[in-house]
């Protein structure tokens, strides 16, 4: 088991700082030789093989090169539809594999992810070949701490480009048998009109397209997402049924009587496991469960006993060997982590129980119930640090809720869902009542989840270097210590790698979030948080407030906003307000101008307040203004450093606003030529001029003349679309940390050499230096 775990640890380690391809080949060859010819070097050799194998996979992953030009609108590409297309309102999102090379560096076989929005979007089915006109660009997304990393998700699924379709036609009507069946099943279940049809499909086939965003949010908040994930129980159920069916066939059919019943049962069980995993799309939990179940079935077939820890280590190593990039998936850590914790706790107890006399039926039932309760407590305690990292908070009722809901889902909802879906193709009239019973059970489950979500979770305002923690966890279980000592070491390592981040009294932090073509800035003192604007909301329905601002504030600042300042009513500044008001604890609201549906007091020049020794002052607007010049301009000052949040003020307001020299300035109007006059730039003379604008935005922000104007006074100009979120601390006013960290190799523009991209401020040799 040691070499398997060492190989797995090597695969994880390779993601910290990927090796060049040549170095990976040399390391892999030397490690293989060490494993073959030196027994004492098997564990280090296996570790080296894991590092080399993952480095090769990373080097060959379709991570786009920085600066690759986008395909022109209307470029024609031929692609095969892969997976299950997802309809989002009037739009369709799907993935395809290119059947011929395209311009801008895309080769045959590359995978692309496209959206199609039109008055009448055609019906795309898995396996079809479509000739489409599309605009395709390198994968790029918002780069913020504590927020879902879409670029990492794209790299993990080996998607080389994203974009949108402007038109197309069906060229070849081929079908992928399995995906086409799953797609047809989705349509059948949708037509039944069930309340929880998405949950039924998720439990039976792994298709989560019909599960609502609100349901996912509730499940995440209560740490019950696993309830809608196909688990080892599902796969184990098919393995047991397959074994029983095989044993029955061995006794009934003449051709199988010559074979051992155990062998026939094993073959049928393996076929059932593989068949169900194929239908379920070989998702991560399904693959892990199938590997472990397959190991157990093979061992039972040949008459060998297999330890749970051995099956776990084998499943982990096999999965990482076939797909090293699975390390990028949060589900990998949660799925294997939960099973690993349970094995580490319960496996040593099994031999002692087997050695004892068999308990009475009532005692056995009580023992099983006790094990279920203890399992929930063990997972809750051991998983608290990891949930804090990946989810952002820990829900205090999670153990109790899971204790109630796991039996409801595992013993009632899941079997009924699987049976009902199977019966749809055999006897639809029978399938209806079965799926109706599953729907009712799942509705009760979601009612309990909704009730639990009314209690706020414990926010985890933490940062953690998760890969290092994973390596420490793996090494901890290799040490020849007691179970308690190893668990204590693992939890201690995670706690040591996790740190609280709150400014000292009299200091403050500023984070200009990467929200695309819009604005959202968070200012934090010791005990207070100010949110200046909430980012845009797009016509497609994508809400940056919900996707970026809310997760960041929840995880970095505990979900509490002391004051929400909406600079003015433009949608790129207030589009996320609905989500922010709904999902965060907002104590007060200030408005530069009226915003429909939002109640708050108006910003007025001269308003001032003191938070934790830090002075806040409203510099603008004057009364009677509307539009960009009504923007609420806020100054934050700790006596040494000054930050100015300028909104979208333009020339007229810039001439009248009483602004002084700033350490950091959020540049007015995204760097437009209608703002940042020479006089305003000289008066502010910022060390850092931060432009909140989207990557390659069609407005051309920031304008070249504006950038040169700031540089002429010695400012360091940074654009969120280029470098990601920008964090500045008054405790270190000469530096900022940006969101596009270099160790995240899936970033198209990552620079090697630093664990974090730290940018030093301007040299102050401009025309206003020394003022």
Image (spheres, rainbow, N blue to C red):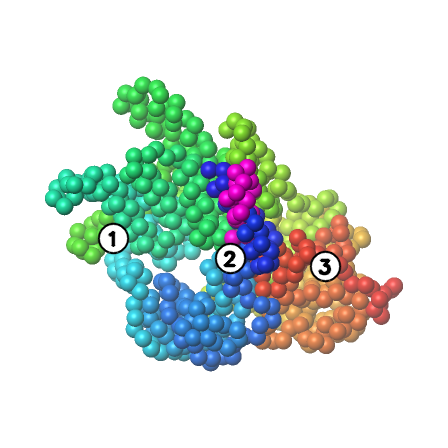
Q: Position of residue 701 (x, y in %)?
A: 64, 73
Report which residue position mark 1 lands on: 421
Report which residue position mark 3 lands on: 759
| 35 lies above or below 487 | below
> Can residue 251 be seen by looking at this rendering?
yes
Residue at mark 1 to residue at mark 3: CA–CA distance: 56 Å
Residue in the image at 37% along x and 75% along y: 130
Dominant secondary structure (helix, strand or loop) of the stretch shown in magenta: helix
Residue 57, numbered label: 2
Asked whether residue 35 is drawn in magenta, I would say yes
> Dot 3 surroundings within 10 Å: few (below 14), some, or many (20 or more)?
some
Horizontal relation, residue 646 to residue 187: left or right: right
Asked whether residue 165 is drawn in magenta, I would say no
Seen from this angle, which residue lies furthest top?
Answer: 357
| 536 lies above or below 334 | below
Q: Nearer the viewer, mark 1 or mark 2?
A: 2
Residue at mark 1 to residue at mark 2: CA–CA distance: 37 Å
Image quadrant holding the C terminus, namely: bottom right
Foreground of the two, 657 or 680: 680
Magenta span of residues: 32-53
Disc 3 on helix, strand or loop? strand
Q: Earlier in the sequence, mark 3 or mark 2?
A: 2
Horizontal relation, residue 584 to residue 430: left or right: right
| 653 lies above or below 597 | below
Q: Earlier in the sequence, mark 1 or mark 3?
A: 1
Q: Earlier in the sequence, mark 1 or mark 2?
A: 2
Residue in the image at 49% along x and 40% along y: 3
Q: Do the residues under discs 1 and 3 have CB atoms within 8 angstroms? A: no
């Amino acid at each position: 088991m040691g070499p398997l775990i060492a190989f797995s640890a090597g695969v994880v380690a390779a993601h910290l700082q990927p090796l060049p391809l040549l170095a990976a080949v040399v390391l892999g060859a030397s490690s293989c030789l060490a494993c073959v010819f030196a027994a004492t070097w098997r564990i280090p050799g296996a570790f080296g093989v894991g590092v080399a194998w993952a480095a090769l996979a990373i080097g060959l992953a379709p991570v786009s090169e920085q600066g690759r030009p986008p395909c022109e609108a209307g470029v024609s590409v031929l692609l095969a539809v892969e997976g299950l297309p997802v309809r989002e309102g009037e739009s369709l999102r799907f993935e395809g594999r290119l059947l011929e090379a395209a311009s801008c560096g895309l080769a045959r076989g590359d995978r692309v992810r496209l959206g199609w929005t039109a008055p009448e979007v055609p019906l795309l089915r898995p396996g079809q070949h479509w000739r489409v006109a599309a605009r395709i660009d390198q994968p790029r997304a918002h780069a913020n701490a504590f927020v879902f990393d879409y670029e990492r998700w794209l790299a993990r699924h080996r998607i080389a480009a994203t974009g949108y379709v402007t038109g197309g036609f069906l060229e070849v009507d081929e079908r992928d048998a399995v995906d086409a069946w799953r797609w047809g099943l989705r349509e059948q279940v949708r037509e039944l009109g069930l309340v929880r049809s998405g949950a039924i499909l998720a439990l039976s086939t792994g298709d989560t397209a019909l599960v609502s965003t609100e349901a996912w949010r509730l499940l995440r908040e209560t740490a019950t997402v696993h309830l809608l994930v196909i688990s080892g129980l599902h796969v184990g159920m098919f393995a047991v049924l397959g074994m029983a069916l095989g044993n029955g066939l061995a006794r009934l059919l003449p051709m199988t009587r010559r074979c051992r019943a155990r062998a026939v049962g094993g073959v049928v069980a393996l076929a059932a496991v593989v068949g169900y995993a194929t239908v379920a799309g070989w998702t991560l939990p399904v693959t892990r469960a199938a590997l472990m179940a397959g190991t157990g079935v093979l061992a039972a077939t040949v008459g060998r006993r297999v330890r749970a820890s051995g099956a776990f280590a084998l499943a982990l190593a096999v999965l990482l060997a076939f797909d090293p990039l699975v390390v990028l998936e949060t589900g990998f850590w949660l799925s294997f982590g939960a099973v690993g914790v349970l094995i580490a706790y319960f496996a040593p107890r099994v031999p002692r129980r087997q050695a004892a006399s068999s308990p009475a039926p009532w005692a056995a039932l009580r023992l099983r119930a006790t094990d279920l309760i203890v399992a929930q407590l063990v997972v809750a305690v051991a998983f608290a640090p990891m949930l804090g990292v990946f989810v952002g908070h820990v829900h205090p009722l999670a153990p109790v809720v899971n204790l109630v809901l796991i039996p409801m889902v595992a013993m009632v909802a899941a079997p009924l869902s699987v049976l009902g879906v199977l019966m749809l193709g055999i006897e639809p009239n029978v399938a209806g009542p079965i799926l109706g019973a599953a729907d009712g059970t799942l509705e009760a489950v979601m009612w309990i989840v909704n009730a639990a979500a009314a209690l706020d979770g414990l926010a985890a305002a933490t940062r953690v270097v998760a890969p290092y923690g994973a390596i420490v966890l793996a090494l901890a279980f290799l040490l020849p210590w007691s179970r308690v000592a190893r668990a204590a070491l693992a939890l201690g390592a995670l706690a040591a790698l996790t740190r609280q981040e709150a400014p000292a009294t009299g200091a403050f932090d500023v984070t200009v979030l990467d929200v695309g073509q819009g604005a959202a800035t968070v200012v934090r003192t010791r005990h207070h948080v100010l949110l200046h604007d909430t980012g845009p909301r797009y016509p497609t329905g994508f809400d940056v407030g919900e996707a970026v601002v809310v997760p960041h504030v929840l995880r970095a600042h505990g979900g509490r906003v002391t004051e929400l300042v909406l600079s003015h009513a433009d949608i790129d500044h207030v589009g996320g307000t609905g989500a922010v008001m709904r999902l965060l604890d907002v104590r007060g609201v200030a408005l530069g101008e009226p915003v429909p549906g939002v109640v708050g007091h108006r910003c007025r020049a001269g308003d001032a307040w003191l938070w934790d020794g830090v002075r806040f002052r409203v510099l603008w607007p004057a009364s009677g203004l509307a539009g960009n010049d009504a923007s609420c301009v806020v100054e934050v000052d700790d006596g040494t450093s000054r930050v100015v949040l300028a909104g979208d003020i333009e020339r007229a307001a810039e001439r009248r606003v009483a602004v002084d020299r700033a350490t950091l300035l959020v540049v007015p109007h995204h760097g437009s030529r209608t703002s940042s006059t020479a006089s305003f730039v000289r008066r502010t003379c910022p060390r850092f001029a931060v432009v909140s604008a989207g990557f390659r935005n069609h407005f051309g922000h920031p304008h070249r003349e504006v950038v040169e104007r700031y540089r002429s006074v010695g400012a360091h100009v940074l654009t969120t679309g280029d470098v990601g979120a920008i964090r500045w601390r008054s405790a270190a006013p000469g530096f900022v940390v940006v969101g596009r960290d270099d160790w995240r190799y899936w970033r198209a523009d990552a620079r090697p050499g630093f664990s974090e991209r730290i940018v030093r401020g301007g040299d102050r040799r401009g025309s206003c230096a020394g003022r």
